[in-house]
Amino acid sequence: MNEQSAAPAAPAEQYVLTLSCPDKQGIVHAVSSYLFMTGCNIEDSQQFGDHDTGLFFMRVHFSAEAPVTVEKLRASFAAIGDSFHMEWQIHRVADRMRVVLLVSKFGHCLNDLLFRSRIGALPVEIAAVVSNHTDFAELVASYDIPFHHIPVTRENKPQAEAQLLEIVRSEEVELVVLARYMQVLSDDLCKALSGQIINIHHSFLPSFKGAKPYHQAHARGVKLIGATAHYVTADLDEGPIIEQEVERVGHDVTPDQLVAIGRDVECQALARAVKWHAERRILLNGRRTVVFA
């Protein structure tokens, strides 16, 4: 009589804990002891103490067997969070972050993010694409993603932003990505979505602001061009920097060639920033970021 083999155990659920708080002794011990006492196993842990701000930052990737749930973990960790005055979050790794992409008339970053999401290179679910033009409606439709055309003028800007905010809230979106969206967001919208908007700036901040940055770079004879992914704040292009990418260029490169190289650089920097944000690897540290990449 053959014995039936036991059914394989279900894989352990994966979670990520992120936290920041005033730096003091005992934080790591408290977190690791809590995870041990709740039957969790630490898969990866990163931490950083900033001597300038006196803050401590930590990201812990851990696993847990049922009946542990994210709700139970959050409820039981609250006491530790309170005792150390932490700002903290716990998320399931399997829950892909819901994202809205904003675009105008330059589609290279949009196309790159759509493709990376489709092949699983980005742990996000693109809930919608919003544009003040209709140029990329067909492209977005090919990915079976809702496309919203919201024209923006000086007169209707408050109404247009209200429509955008309604999409963000109704779709339970956690991140808005400005994939070359050439509209300045209002202070009110920046505050409403603080820490939830990522922009790609088509230059290596803070140089070459404004129109035709690559032509400005060419006129100055630069040897490096770059792009900067950063969080959006009410201060235009001054938000906390997440990632920067550069490419060396020679004296013989034309402005059009710089634009082509710049497109690739922008896509790389923005994709990494979105990926790190979706994986809960970025913590705000005043006007800077801590990136556990």
Image: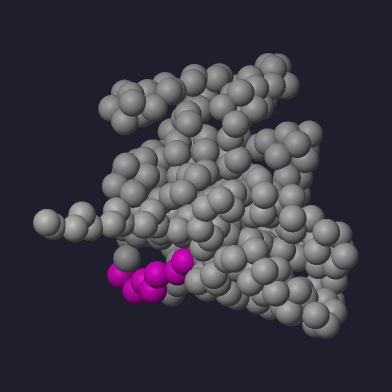
Tell me the quarter of the picture where residue 192 sits.
top right
Q: Horizontal placement of 105 versus 60: left or right?
A: left
| Residue appearing at x 58%, y 74% in the figure | 45
Q: Is residue 173 visible?
A: yes
Q: Position of residue 280 (x, y in %)?
A: 58, 57
Q: In the image, is residue 239 above or below residue 249? A: above
| Residue appearing at x 50%, y 71% in the figure | 43
Residues shaded magenta: 245-252
Tell me the quarter of the picture where residue 30 sits.
bottom right
Q: In the image, is residue 25 above or below residue 158? A: below
> Count the marks: how many?
0
Which of the image's four quarters has the N terminus?
bottom left
Q: Position of residue 263 (x, y in %)?
A: 38, 53
Q: Horizontal placement of 46 versus 25: left or right?
A: left
Q: Is residue 239 visible?
A: no
| Residue appearing at x 52%, y 38% in the figure | 98
Nearer to the camera, 33 or 136: 33
Magenta span contains residue 250:
yes
Instruction: Indicate how the structure is coloured in the image.
Output: one colour
Q: Horizontal placement of 174 versus 286: left or right?
A: left
Q: In the image, is residue 194 above or below residue 254? A: above
Nearer to the camera, 235 or 99: 99
- Outermost residue on the front side: it is 1
Magenta span contains residue 203:
no
| Residue appearing at x 44%, y 54% in the figure | 271
Q: Position of residue 53 (x, y in %)?
A: 83, 74
Q: Position of residue 44 (x, y in %)?
A: 52, 73
